[in-house]
Image (cartoon, rainbow, N blue to C red):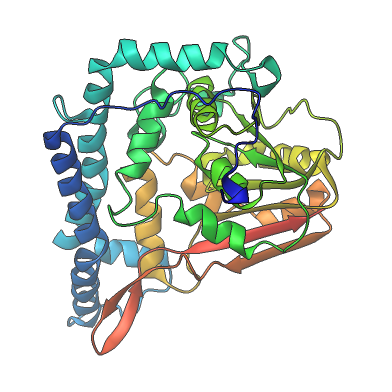
Amino acid sequence: MNAALQPLDPGTPPAAPLTVRESRDFRSYHAFLRAARNYMEGPLVGQMHDAYERALEAPGAAGPPADWRAAEAVLDGLTEFQFYCWAYRNLQRFKYHRSSLGIFALLEAQRATLAAQLEATAAATPPAQLRLDPQLELPEYFRHVPFHQHTGGVAKDILDGVAYEIGRRTTVPAHADPNGIYRILFETLPKRDYARVLDWGTGHGAALMTWQESHPESECHGVDLSAPCLLLANQRARERGYRFFLSQQDLEHLDYPDNSFDLVFFNFMLHELAPAHTPALLAEACRVLRPGGLFAGHEFHLRPGDPFQNVLQRSHAWTNNETYSTPWYETPIGELAREAGFSKVSIEPFERLNRSVKRPGRAPINANYWNLYVFEK
């Protein structure tokens, strides 16, 4: 057996897999939504950009826009941009909320079985490996936001973590590895010993399991505000025999001692945080790192000097309930990281994630943009 896949908790039998039964109609419906999203993010962006260029060259036009606000004034009048925004919002809404084929309907029909299995696996987990806190007061910035159009947020229903997992999987093209985005991040990190790591906002646990696959020597911890997400992360870890230490905590007030971890990693978390809390969150992440430890992750942002991309990126905030995205783009994260105690701050374009829409014989169009953040204590 490959050493990286050996069970890490041999004293506890693996849990039975939690399986959501999906009909052929469900799979076909979500394959259609995924194909429609691929069209929206590819050919439609190209058509939109062509219309945008024509508008800029029309008689009486003001010429190239000086900033995103000027570009938005042009794009707002284009049918292609209006359709793009409609599709961005409604394809996500159709995914979750369709009465017969949406994710919520699928899970509701299997609620009793799925909830019972999550609870049974949790009951069989050693207390140190799954710490839930029913008394935890969730921060207002988290409690009142239905992120990604997930009605009620991801912390109120026992099946919220399962819905989140399916929602992520059905966004990624069927042929693609849904955990590939985590592998790309981990491959960029310095090659060194990471004896103890913390997944900062672990969600359904896929990133932490991806880390453990290639770093079986690491003791893996994960924190999140959402108990339902942690229940699923625990379920998936137990299925594979992994010994994780998962806990429901406020990232701003962790209960770990100073200097606990060699690495704290995150995946597109910064845009989910209210800017007023960012300084304290960074300071707490720095506190639990050992000297020389890294706080690292990737996050989408605005492409410098590209008003067209900036408008598209900003539009996602209001089309997909990304409440804190637009203030995130104005957050001086490097400056705040230094103030939080990090001695080295690196922010670079994450080119392996920066997809573009290619056009034969013409310059590609950037529809998204990612940065890689590596802060060292």
Across the whole image, how many numbered discs are drawn on residues?
Answer: 0
* Quadrant in which residue 220 is drawn: top right
Residue sticking out furthest to the front: 1
Rendered position, 353 above or below 34: below
Rendered position, 162 above or below 200: above
Residue 153 shows in the view: no
Give the side of residue 96 with respect to residue 292, left or right: left
Q: Position of residue 269 (x, y in %)?
A: 55, 44
| Residue depicted at 30% across the width and 27% down the height | 20
The residue nearer to you, when weighing 218 against 135, is 218
The residue nearer to you, when weighing 143 against 36, is 36
* Quadrant in which residue 289 is drawn: top right
* Quadrant in which residue 164 is drawn: top left
Residue 140 shows in the view: yes
Q: Position of residue 86 (x, y in %)?
A: 20, 47
| Residue depicted at 29% across the width and 57% down the height | 175
Q: Position of residue 159 (x, y in %)?
A: 39, 20
| Residue depicted at 42% across the width and 41% down the height | 322
